[in-house]
Amino acid sequence: MAQQLALVFQLLQQTCIFLVIAWILAKTPLFTPLMQVTIRLPHKLTCYVVFSGFCVLGTLLGLHVGEAIANIRAIGAVLGGLLGGPSVGLAVGLTGGLHRYGMGGPTDIACMVSTVTEGLLGGLVHRLLIRRGRVDLLFQPMLVGLVTLAAEIVQMLIILALTTPYATAFAVVNTVALPMLTANSIGSAMFMRLLLDRRAMLEKYSNAFSARALRIAARTDGVLRGGLSAASAQKVATIIAEETGVGAVAITDRERLLAFTGTGADHHLPGTPIVSTHTLEAIRDNRVVYADGNEVAYTCSIHPECRLGSTLVIPLQDADGQVIGTIKLYEPKGRLFARVNRTLGEGIANLLARQILTGRLESQRSLLSQTEIKLLHAQVNPHFLFNALNTINAVIRIDPDRARTLVQHLSTFFRKNLKRPEEEVTLAEEIEHVNAYLQIELARFGERLKVEIDLPYIYAQARLPAFSLQPLVENAIKHGTAHLLGPGHIRLFAEPGKNEHTLLVHVEDNAGLYPLARQAGAGLGMTLVDKRLKARFGERFGLAVDALAERYTRITLTLPLNEESPDASAAG
């Protein structure tokens, strides 16, 4: 037993050398494909080369015990299969096994067979988890350690089965089993931890993207208000490239490349027609297209020697959701496109689209002056955008998927915010705008804010001026529930008015701070909403306030019910 314990510590020392070499190599682009599930053939070849090397290294760092070798070869074989799949696991195991067979000894055949088996075992676990949609488990150090432990147990059984005489096999297993089970299991788990730490470091740098988004918004403010021209697009592309640090940035309209900066600028020439299938697909289908060079192949359509290896193509939309162009972010070959970068890239594209559309606003036909409309927008956008991006920045660190959802809500909010204030929308469309705003606020306030929306479907087609409800909801939070020590409660509900052709829509909070809110300037948005309703539908429509100090504030909008809208009697 003393000999086995001494061998355990000696083999763990060799494992440390093994991991130091892995740590050094992790600093190079060689390890980039290993930080995600390997699918494409070039990445599979990289996976094979890397883990075959570690498989051979595990034998060379082994300790000779009589005619046997206590080794850490299984780390390379199992990880090759887990990350590369059965084919890579088989190839790595065969390479490591043949190397061990060439060193001879009574266990040479058994060790060769067991190494191939270990690689296949890792590959089969890879395939099982992929089919079950649990790719995340492939990167769990605990699971990796357990799979390696099982693989080493199988190796010991193979040595007992194939090595002759049996007495020799038993003596070898009795001596090396505990050291190899311990060192290989711990070593493979630490190897995976090293990969995860490297990936986390890359993601950490991308967290700064949210702050950059604010700088991009500030630096590009006003640039695109004159329209999407080659000159303005080039300015914006340069700003985005400087702030994000991506390999290259391009901006197109529906037909031509307007601007390009970064890697590949020598052959991606502004003014040339769009030939990229990814860009054409994004324009045609009005959706984000991400070609990571791994799961979705990417090859430059202009120059075969182009160093760009992945692209994110995001449509720029007008107020009606029609594509007017695209913004494209690129990364060179060998560099990961971080998920946070992709998410915020989409958010930046929507902010740019909003700038373009703001520049296209026609002279207002409403009875409000241009100054009043701008003031109403200014009340919401900068303050809300700053808080929203700060919220997303905080959520990114703990829940990237939720952060992506919040960016989509932010995109919906600003797209709806681009509606002309004199334009009529349905109540359902206005609620979609309000809901996008509330999702951001719910993420910001957490348990301090609860929202209840009770608007029956039969009133969904009631019409009102765009941008009528959101300022009221914002006031309820900003000048109401945000000042409460306890949880705030916002309630939106509708009911028929006293007149059968009217509808009452209520926005209620549980703060009851309406007099103080008016003193703080919260009445401007409400006044404008009231004026717009009266101007559109007549003096009997508009806005009313009912408040009980420190209990509630209820804002009521009186709207007309369209004759075409279903009435309550028609509801199922």
Image (cartoon, grey):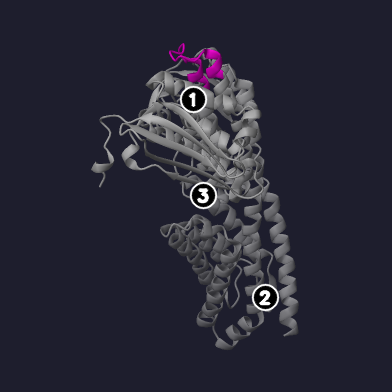
Q: How many neighbours does mark 3 have within 10 angstroms: few (below 14), some (14-19), or many (20 or more)?
A: some
Q: Residue at x 58, y 78 (%)?
A: 106
Q: Is residue 456 visible?
A: yes
* Front position among marks 2 and 1: 1
Q: Which mark is residue 514?
A: none
Per the image, the residue denoted by label 1 is: 529
The range drawn in magenta is: 353-374
Residue 222: % across, % down: 58, 16
Residue 312 visible in this rendered orientation of the protein: no
The disc, 3 or 2, on the residue closer to the chain's N-terminal end is: 3
Residue nearest the observer in this picture, 190 or 466 = 466
The amino acid type of the residue labelled 2 equals Pro
Q: Is residue 402 left or right of residue 243?
A: left
Q: Are marks 2 and 1 in contact (CB under 8 Å)?
A: no
In the image, what residue occupies the spot 50% across and 19% down? 358
x, y percent for residue 425 = 38, 27
Q: Amino acid at mark 1?
A: Val
Along the line of sight, the residue nearer the viewer: 468 or 310? 468
| Corner quadrant of residue 8 | bottom right
Specify few, some or many for label 1: CA neighbours under 10 Å numbering under 14, 14-19, or 20 or more: many
| Quarter of the image that includes the N terminus | bottom right
The picture places residue 404, in percent across and down from the top left corner, at 52, 42
* Disc number placed over residue 179 in the picture, else none: 2
Where residue 330 sits, quadrant-wise, is top right
Above or below residue 402? Residue 156 is: below
Q: Secondary structure at mark 1?
A: helix
